[in-house]
Amino acid sequence: MHLPIWLFYAVIALVFWGITGVTQKLSTNAISTQLSFLWFVYSMIAIALVILVTVPIQWHMTARVFWLAVVGGALNGLGALTSFAAFEKGGKASIVVPLCYLFPVVTVVLAMTFLHESLTRTQAIGIALALLAAILLSQEAPPESQPPA
């Protein structure tokens, strides 16, 4: 069986983003949300520069496509910034990351609304289970009380 190339890239993204959750939590344990985010941006700029000099790019696009790309990038950046804030304010990586990475549920709802895509029963059950998982993951045990010394 031959796997599609998109699946290969999706698995690589999964691994990169899985590691990212830990590195972002570790960085926000030591530096502020803002500084962590700035280093995130600097790394994106470095990657963009490598792409710019190594990949031929077709720059012709409509204004609509340009602005969709700009808004998408801005929303991605704001999502990263707020996830750093969640880490810095005490969120555990094991809870913050799975909760933040439920963003596909929002994408599915928007795709159904604006792109007129539909879900199968199996996909709907998967979304319901993902939401249930988020609820269960966000439940933290109360801190154990320490006996007086």
Image (spheres, helix red, strand yellow):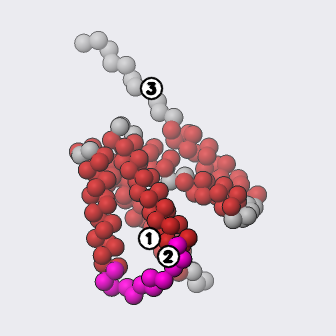
Q: Are marks 2 and 3 in contact (CB under 8 Å)?
A: no
Question: On the rendered structure, is 80 left or right of 72?
Answer: left
Amino acid type, mark 3: Pro
Q: Residues within 10 Å of mark 2 (few under 14, many from 20)?
A: few
Q: Quadrant of the N terminus?
A: bottom right
How far apart, in angstroms, are the residues tagged by discs 3 and 1?
36 Å
Q: Quadrant of residue 145?
A: top left
Q: Which residue is label 3 attached to?
A: 142
Q: What label does residue 8 carry, if any?
A: 2
Under circle 1, the secondary element is helix
The percent position of residue 15, horizontal first and vertical second, equals 42, 65
Left or right: 55 as drawn, with respect to 2: left
Type of residue at label 2? Phe
Q: Given contact means CB atoms under 8 Å apart, are the residues at marks 3 and 1 in contact?
A: no
Q: Which residues are magenta?
A: 52-63
Chain-order first, disc 2 or disc 3: 2
- Regarding mark 3 in the picture, which secondary structure is present there? loop
Q: Position of residue 38 (x, y in %)?
A: 28, 55
Residue at 40% from the left image edge and 25% from the top image edge: 143
Callout 2: helix, strand or loop? helix
Which residue is at the front of the view, 9 or 52?
52
Q: Of callouts 3 and 1, which one flags the residue occurring earlier in the amino acid sequence?
A: 1
Q: Position of residue 102 (x, y in %)?
A: 55, 52
Is 100 on the left-hand or right-hand side of 126?
left
Where residue 56 sits, quadrant-wise, is bottom left
Q: Residue furthest front?
A: 63
Q: Which residue is mark 1?
A: 12
Question: Would you say residue 126 is visible in this rendering?
Answer: no
Residue 4 % position (x, y): 57, 80
Residue, x 46% and y 30% (percent of image)?
Answer: 141
